[in-house]
Image (cartoon, helix red, strand yellow):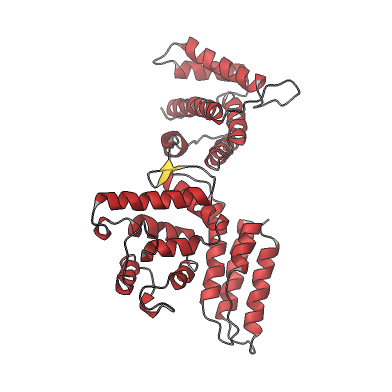
C-alpha cells in the first residue's frame, strides 16, 4: 500500500529522472518504464491501469508528457488520502474516484470541452485554446493531431492526464459552465445533467449537490470543526466523517459511537462526574432531563444494536437511512457538547 511518505519520495525520484541528461539511447525510456512498474507493483488495480495506460514513445528524447502524467497520478493518490474538510474537498473526491474507476475519464472530459459531447456547446480550435488560456492552463490546442475540422479529443485528453484532479476540478467548476458559453439557461441545465449522469455512471460513491448531487448535511460534516484537547476524540470524529463521506455508513456509525462514548469523559476521568458536568453545561435552554434521556437512549442503541457490540443475537441495522439518522443524531450531540465545553473553558 502506498503511503504519503512513499509518494513524496516517488515524486522526488521522478523529477530527478525527468531532469537527468546522462542517459545512453533508450536508457531513459527503460528507466521510466521500470519506475512505473515499481509504483504499479504496490498499487491497487485502478492505479495500475492508469499507470499502464501512459504512452512512452520509443525515442531517445522522451517528451515531458509521460513524466507529467505519472506525476499527476501520484498527486491524485496523495489527494485521495486527505480527510475531506469542506464541500469542495468532497466534490474533488467524487471526481477523483471517478477518474480512477473510469479509464476514459479524461477523454470524456475532453469531449465536454470540445463539444463532442452533445450536452455541451461546440468549440472551434481557437475557442478551445481560449478556454484553456482563460483558465491560465498551458495548452496550445491549435497544434492538435488528427481531425482538422475540430480540436482533437484524444490530444486534449492526453493534456488533461498531465494535470492533477485539482486542476480538472477547476476546469469543470470555473470553465465548463460559464454562462457566456451558453445561449440559453436550459442549455446550462442540459450540460449539468450531462455531467451529473457521467459522474453517477462512473462511480457509486456519495452523491453531490447541483452538479455533484450533494444532499448530506454539510454544516455538521464540514462547517463544524470538531476540536478538543483530546486528540483521540478528534481523530475518531474525523474518521467517522470520512467514512460517511466515502459511503461506508456502518463504519461511520461505529466510529461516531466510539467518539460519543469518549465524549462522556471529556471533563473528568470519572465518567459519571463528567456526564453530570456536561449535562449542566447543556441545560441552559432545555431541561436537563432531556439530555439525560438523550445520552441514555443513545447508549442503549449502541449497546443493543450492531454498533458497539456484534455478539450473536445483537440486532443489525440494515437500512442506510436509519444509519444516517443515527449518525447525525450522535454527531449533533457531540458537536453541541464540544461547543459548550470549549465555551466554558474559555470563559
Residue at the (65%, 89%) spot, across then down: 24
> For this rendering, which residue is in front, 332 or 185?
185
Percent from the top left, x then y, of residue 326?
54, 25
Residue at the (49%, 47%) spot, across then down: 200
The reply to whether residue 171 is visible in this rendering is: yes
Quarter of the rendering containing residue 262: top right
Check the image and name the residue furthest to the right: 312
> For this rendering, which residue is in front, 40 or 192?
192
> Where is 37 relative to 211, above or below?
below
Residue at the (62%, 28%) spot, across then down: 318
Percent from the top left, x then y, of residue 32?
63, 76
In this image, 21 relative to 182: left or right? Answer: right
Quarter of the rendering containing residue 306: top right
Q: Across the whole image, how many numbered discs are drawn on residues?
A: 0
Indicate the quadrant containing the N terminus: top left, top right, bottom left or bottom right: bottom right
> For this rendering, which residue is in front, 11 or 198?
198
> Where is 339 relative to 162, above or below?
above
The reply to whether residue 92 is visible in this rendering is: no
> Where is 147 relative to 251, above or below?
below
Residue at the (58%, 67%) spot, across then down: 11
> Where is 154 relative to 246, above or below?
below
Indicate the quadrant containing the C terminus: top left, top right, bottom left or bottom right: top left
Percent from the top left, x then y, of residue 122?
32, 65
Amino acid at each position: 500500500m502506498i503511503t504519503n511518505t512513499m509518494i513524496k519520495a516517488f515524486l522526488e525520484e521522478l523529477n530527478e529522472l525527468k531532469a537527468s541528461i546522462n542517459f545512453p539511447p533508450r536508457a531513459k525510456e527503460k528507466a521510466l518504464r521500470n519506475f512505473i512498474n515499481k509504483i504499479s507493483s504496490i498499487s491497487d488495480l485502478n492505479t495500475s491501469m492508469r499507470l499502464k495506460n501512459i504512452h512512452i514513445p520509443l525515442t531517445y528524447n522522451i517528451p515531458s508528457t509521460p513524466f507529467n502524467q505519472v506525476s499527476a497520478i501520484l498527486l491524485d493518490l496523495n489527494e485521495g488520502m486527505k480527510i475531506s474538510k469542506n464541500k469542495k474537498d468532497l466534490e474533488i473526491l467524487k471526481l477523483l474516484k471517478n477518474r480512477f474507476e473510469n479509464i476514459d475519464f479524461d477523454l470524456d472530459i475532453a469531449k465536454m470541452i470540445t463539444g463532442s459531447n452533445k450536452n455541451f456547446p461546440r468549440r472551434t480550435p481557437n475557442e478551445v485554446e481560449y478556454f484553456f488560456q482563460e483558465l491560465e492552463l498551458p495548452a496550445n490546442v491549435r497544434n492538435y493531431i488528427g481531425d482538422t475540422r475540430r480540436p482533437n479529443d484524444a490530444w486534449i485528453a492526453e493534456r488533461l492526464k498531465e494535470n492533477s484532479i485539482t486542476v480538472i476540478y477547476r476546469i469543470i467548476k470555473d470553465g465548463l459552465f460559464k454562462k457566456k458559453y451558453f445561449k440559453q439557461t436550459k442549455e446550462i441545465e442540459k450540460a449539468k445533467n450531462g455531467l451529473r449522469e457521467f459522474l453517477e455512471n462512473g462511480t457509486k460513491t456519495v452523491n453531490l449537490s447541483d452538479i455533484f448531487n450533494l444532499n448530506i448535511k454539510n454544516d455538521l460534516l464540514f462547517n463544524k470543526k470538531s476540536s478538543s484537547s483530546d486528540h483521540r476524540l478528534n481523530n475518531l470524529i474525523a474518521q467517522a466523517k470520512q467514512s460517511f463521506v466515502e459511503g461506508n455508513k456502518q463504519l461511520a456509525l461505529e466510529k461516531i459511537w466510539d467518539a460519543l462514548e469518549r465524549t462522556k469523559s471529556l471533563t473528568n476521568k470519572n465518567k459519571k462526574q463528567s456526564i453530570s458536568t456536561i449535562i449542566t453545561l447543556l441545560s441552559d435552554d432545555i431541561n436537563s432531563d432531556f439530555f439525560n434521556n438523550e445520552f441514555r437512549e443513545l447508549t442503549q442503541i449502541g449497546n443493543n444494536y450492531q454498533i458497539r457490540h456484534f455478539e450473536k443475537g445483537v440486532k443489525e441495522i440494515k437500512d442506510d437511512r436509519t444509519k444516517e439518522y443515527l449518525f447525525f443524531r450522535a454527531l449533533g450531540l457531540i458537536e453541541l457538547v464540544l461547543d459548550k465545553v470549549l465555551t466554558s473553558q474559555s470563559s
